[in-house]
């Protein structure tokens, strides 16, 4: 198909008549009202109130030769939208409203982080300070098209890195598209902060203030991100508080023989020594 | 008081000559003494500050004096209304002269026609007021337009930075050279068009900006003949095709035959890589196209169409057809519509790959209404790491504006965007006010957001153009945002403040400077330090 198309073009070009270049004749026959546009100073200085047409010539348009737009004559109507004179270099992705990004002072885009507020992904925090191509990968057509607003469409690499090096985020695939925002902000990707963590275990104050996720978790269950403590795998308390190291403080504590992550949390749901007993009501046996 | 005209009339009659000269008779000359000086002199000539209307005539001999002493004579050679040249030796600037000459007498006052009768004046008034006058939209004063002065070649060389605190993978810096050639004459009516960017990244994160640190992007590089007076058109190279709606750029050729104002033709070639723009054989497109223009009693209907096959690794082989129509009714109404349908290895719902429509209406000269809707239906798998292709989505927006006074413009705008993959949506509505008479424009705006980003924002902007080649713009923006996850606003509202300054300064007729600085900071509570950052650039722009 391609070869056929190219061959057709070559044949067309080879057999085309070598027409002499002609200067466009923008004046209709019999049009003698020269003073409507021209001045005695010379034919090159055109004085015409283009505002009368409803299409004021401002910016770069004021420098365009008349025949660039009026290729036949001045009486033939011509289109007023940008596409009637300009090619769409965005392959049709960007729509008809060129003025959303461009103006008559030049083709350099005026679309900036503020204007992004008028689409489905307002640029907040760090996103407002990125090169466009970090998100818009079609540099060939400059289409500025994005697939979805789901975080991992752009942050797949970060998701994989986090799962490999830190807390496993694998369970978040398929969950609410914006679940990442439960822990990560627009200014700082790391460290993640989970505002609802206090409902399960306080980490904003007390002995565990400021502790990082990977100290206690190796995997993050999805319900955590939506504010539920149920069905959460118990944190790795014994990673820091080994049973051997805390055994002296638990002499005579009923059930300590079953020391483990689950048992630690059940007795110390607030993460302090004073809340020993916790939800299960296990108390130190008084001698 | 009423007797005064009669008295003046009697006085005039009493002083009138008894036998006035008949109309058309030559008027008697009047003697006059002309005094003047030599304003400039050469070795053999002098330039006088009196001319024909003062009574100086060619051939007259003028006696010159210098310090009250005779200094010579000079013979008048040519005269203008108020200056003359004379020939003579030893003439010096500043020499004075006095010349007795004659000038034509004052022509008699022409006899005025009698004052029209009241009936005649009323008849004329009725004729004038009864003549229809075509209303025009003109507001500006006549001005001279300098045409045909757009540059053919433009180059932008500069440096751009994107930095934030705390630092992160988005921190980037690069040197950048943009070159654009817009129709440089080549041969036989063919012209060269080019559009390319050369970048040297000095800081980047290869996860988001993969590839070499030096990157060359070629958007367009073609030799094209598209003279509208010829019967054919052709382009080859890396072509951004004309009249082929929805087509990407390709390394190949486009050729067409022109039938009056219409054109039909073929196109085809290999499609470059979307990220690097390098030539590749894994992607291609080809097909036929057509374009027409149909003036219809003062209105204009234009359209273009494409039928093509598209092959690429993401969607395999895809057969596409697209139709683009535009319709204008002067400055009153315009509408555009585009429909792309396709089938192949991947297909969209109802075979509608994309559709969009837009219109603008000016019911009265000071009011405009515009609205648009677009739909993207084709789902194209994205390869990592950078999302390249759009996902199914819908979008609608609209604006209503009023030029309340010549210096006040008020508008209301709104929009809605819906992602059809995640069904996450965002909408906004708000007013904008512009005072066009404050420097080059003072504007204020406000937007209320709904959807997954719930919040509000406001901005103020002022533009200043002290010279035609210089333009400065400054804007202050405030954003307040609450993200909604799973229908619950789970993150406290965050506030951000942004300041943007843009400047374009003409240095010479061919060299200018453009710079842009954006600074944003987060005003979130509970942060150890306020996060902030900048996206800025500085470019020298040369044109030819």
Image (cartoon, coloured by chain):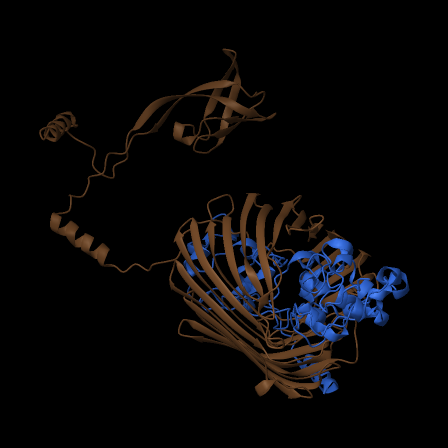
What quarter of the picture does the N terminus of chain B occupy? top left
Q: Is residue B479 left or right of residue B539?
A: left
Q: Position of residue A95 (x, y in %)?
A: 57, 70
Residue B388 in view, yes or no = no
Furthest residue toward right: A244
Q: Position of residue A30 (x, y in %)?
A: 42, 65
Which residue is at the front of the view, B419 or A71?
B419
Q: Position of residue B500 (x, y in %)?
A: 62, 49
- Give above or below for A71 relative to B14: below
Residue B101 in view, yes or no = yes
Which residue is at the front of the view, B299 or B326?
B326
- Give above or below for B335 relative to B454: below
Q: Is residue A255 left or right of residue A13?
A: right
Which residue is at the front of the view, B257 or B304?
B304
Residue at screen point 25% across, 59% down: B131
- Give above or below for B35 relative to B452: above
Which residue is at the front of the view, B234 or B137?
B137
Furthest residue toward left: B3
Furthest residue toward top: B68
* Chain that is blue in the image: A
Q: Position of residue A39 (x, y in %)?
A: 47, 50
* Chain that is brown in the image: B
Residue at screen point 53% across, 60% down: A66
Total labels drawn: 0
């Amino acid at each position: 198909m391609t070869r056929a198309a190219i061959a057709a073009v070559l044949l067309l070009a080879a057999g085309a008549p070598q027409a002499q270049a002609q200067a466009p004749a923008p004046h209709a026959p019999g049009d003698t009202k020269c003073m409507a546009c021209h001045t005695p100073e010379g034919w090159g200085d055109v004085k015409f109130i283009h505002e009368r047409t409803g299409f004021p010539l401002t910016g770069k348009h004021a420098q365009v030769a008349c025949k660039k737009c009026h290729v036949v004559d001045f009486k033939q109507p011509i289109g007023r939208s940008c596409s009637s004179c300009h090619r769409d270099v965005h392959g049709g992705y960007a729509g008809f409203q060129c003025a959303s990004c461009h103006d008559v002072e030049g083709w350099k885009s005026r679309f900036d982080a503020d204007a992004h507020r008028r689409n489905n992904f307002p640029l907040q925090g760090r996103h407002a300070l990125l090169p466009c191509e970090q998100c818009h990968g079609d540099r060939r057509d400059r289409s500025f098209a994005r697939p979805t607003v789901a975080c991992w469409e752009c942050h797949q690499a970060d998701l994989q890195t986090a799962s490999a090096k830190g807390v496993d985020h694998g369970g978040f695939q398929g969950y609410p598209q914006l679940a990442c925002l439960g822990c990560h902000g627009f200014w700082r990707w790391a460290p993640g902060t989970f505002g609802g963590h206090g409902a399960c275990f306080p980490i904003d104050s007390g002995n565990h203030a400021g502790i990082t996720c990977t100290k206690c978790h190796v995997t993050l269950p999805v319900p955590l991100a939506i504010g539920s403590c149920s069905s959460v795998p118990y944190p790795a308390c014994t990673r820091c508080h080994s049973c051997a190291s805390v055994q002296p403080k638990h002499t005579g504590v009923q059930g300590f023989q079953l020391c483990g992550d689950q048992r630690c949390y059940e007795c110390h749901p607030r993460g302090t020594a004073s809340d020993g007993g916790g939800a299960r009501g296990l108390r130190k046996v008084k001698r | 008081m009423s007797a005064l005209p009669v008295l003046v009339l009697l006085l005039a009659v009493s002083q009138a000559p008894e036998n006035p000269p008949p109309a058309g008779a030559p008027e008697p000359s009047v003697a006059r003494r002309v005094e003047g000086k030599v304003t400039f002199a050469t070795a053999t000539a002098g330039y006088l500050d009196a001319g024909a209307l003062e009574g100086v005539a060619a051939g007259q001999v003028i006696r010159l004096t210098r310090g009250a002493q005779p200094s010579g004579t000079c013979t008048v050679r040519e005269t203008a209304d108020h200056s003359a040249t004379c020939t003579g030796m030893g003439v010096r600037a500043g020499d004075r002269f006095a010349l007795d000459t004659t000038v034509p007498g004052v022509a008699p006052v022409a006899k005025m026609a009698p004052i029209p009768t009241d009936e005649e004046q009323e008849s004329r008034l009725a004729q004038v007021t009864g003549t229809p006058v075509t209303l025009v939209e003109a507001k500006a004063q006549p001005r001279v337009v300098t045409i045909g002065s757009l540059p053919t070649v433009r180059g932008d060389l500069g440096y751009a930075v994107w930095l934030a605190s705390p630092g992160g993978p988005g921190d980037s810096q690069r040197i950048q050279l943009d070159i654009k050639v817009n129709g440089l004459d080549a041969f036989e009516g063919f012209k060269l068009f080019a559009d390319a960017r050369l970048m040297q990244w000095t800081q980047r994160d290869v996860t988001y900006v993969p590839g070499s640190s030096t990157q060359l992007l070629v958007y367009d590089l073609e030799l094209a003949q598209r003279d509208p007076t010829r019967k054919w058109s052709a382009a080859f190279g890396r072509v951004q095709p004309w009249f082929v709606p929805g087509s990407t750029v390709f390394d190949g050729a486009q050729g067409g035959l022109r039938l009056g104002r219409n054109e039909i033709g073929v196109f085809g070639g290999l499609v470059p890589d979307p990220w690097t723009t390098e030539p590749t054989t894994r992607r291609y497109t080809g097909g036929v196209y057509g374009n027409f223009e149909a003036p219809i009693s003062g209105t204009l209907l234009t359209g273009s169409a494409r039928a093509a096959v598209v092959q690429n690794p993401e969607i395999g082989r895809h057969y596409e057809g697209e139709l683009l129509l535009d319709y204008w009714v002067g400055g009153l109404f315009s509408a555009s519509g585009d429909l792309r349908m396709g089938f192949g290895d991947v297909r969209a719902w109802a075979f509608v790959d994309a559709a969009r429509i837009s219109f603008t209406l000016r019911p009265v000269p000071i009011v405009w209404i515009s609205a648009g809707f677009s739909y993207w239906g084709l789902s194209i798998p994205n390869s990592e790491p950078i999302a390249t292709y759009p996902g199914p989505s819908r979008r609608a927006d609209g604006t209503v504006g009023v030029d309340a006074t010549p210096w006040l413009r008020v508008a209301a705008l709104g929009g809605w965007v819906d992602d059809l993959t995640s069904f996450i949506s965002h909408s906004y509505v708000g007013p904008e006010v512009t005072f066009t008479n404050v420097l080059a424009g003072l504007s204020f705006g406000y937007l209320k957001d709904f959807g997954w980003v719930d919040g509000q924002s406001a901005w103020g902007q002022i533009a200043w153009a002290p010279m035609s080649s210089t333009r400065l713009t400054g804007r202050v923006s405030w954003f307040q945002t609450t993200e909604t996850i799973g229908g619950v606003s789970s993150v406290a509202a965050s506030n951000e403040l942004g300041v943007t300054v843009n400047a374009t300064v003409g240095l010479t007729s061919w060299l200018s400077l453009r710079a842009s600085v954006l600074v944003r900071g987060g005003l979130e509570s509970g942060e150890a330090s306020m996060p902030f950052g900048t996206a800025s650039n500085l470019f020298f722009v040369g044109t030819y």
